[in-house]
Amino acid sequence: MKTVRVHRNPGCRRCARYARMHQRLDWLGRVEDSAQSPFERPMRMGEVAVRDLRDGCLHAGADGIALLARQVPAYWPLLPLMVIPAVRRAIERDVAGNCGDTCML
């Protein structure tokens, strides 16, 4: 049963690569990928948002990535690191949607 939907920009190659990685590591089948924006505007290149399908809440930034990590057992060892402020800031920067040329790699 799908529990989260990861929203990403359809034109971002880096985001598509991450989506494929999530699918490969998701042996419990909990993660759904979506190239549709959950916002009233198009998603920026590199921007990621995660919707909890159980309650409908939308999570962005480090909170969204932490929600995703809780659903994929392969990511569970990373969860304790996500409370470290420097790690949270790095995650926020990575999924904020201002990746510039790195989205084209």
Image (cartoon, helix red, strand yellow):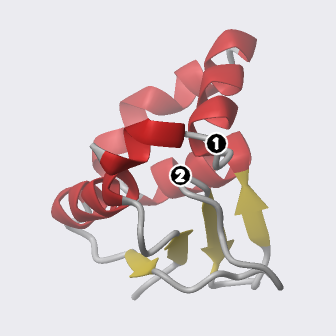
Q: Is residue 83 left or right of residue 81?
A: right
Q: Is residue 53 left or right of residue 76?
A: right
Q: Residue at x 69, y 77 (%)?
A: 42
Question: What amino acid does circle 2 point to?
Answer: Gly
Of the numbered discs in the image, which one, if any, rests on residue 81? none
Residue 2 placement (x, y as % from top left): 43, 84
Q: CA distance from mark 2 to mark 1?
A: 6 Å
SS of the residue under disc 1 = loop
Task: Name the residue tied to disc 2.
Answer: 46
* Residue 13 figure quarter: bottom left
- Quadrant in which the N terminus appears: bottom left
Residue 74 placement (x, y as % from top left): 28, 44
Above-or-below relation of 103 to 41: above
Above-or-below relation of 17 to 23: above
Q: First in sequence, mark 2 or 1: give its number.
A: 2
Q: Is residue 17 left or right of residue 4?
A: left
The 10 Å Cα crowd at callout 1, few under 14, some 14 to 19, many 20 or more, is: some
Q: Residue at x 41, y 47 (%)?
A: 103
Of the numbered discs in the image, which one, if any, rests on residue 98? 1
Question: What amino acid does circle 1 point to?
Answer: Asn
* Of the pair 25 and 15, the residue shown nearer to us: 15
* Of the pair 17 and 51, the residue shown nearer to us: 17
Above-or-below relation of 104 to 16: above
Assess whether mark 1 and mark 2 are in contact (beta carbons under 8 angstroms).
yes
* Of the pair 60 and 93, the residue shown nearer to us: 93
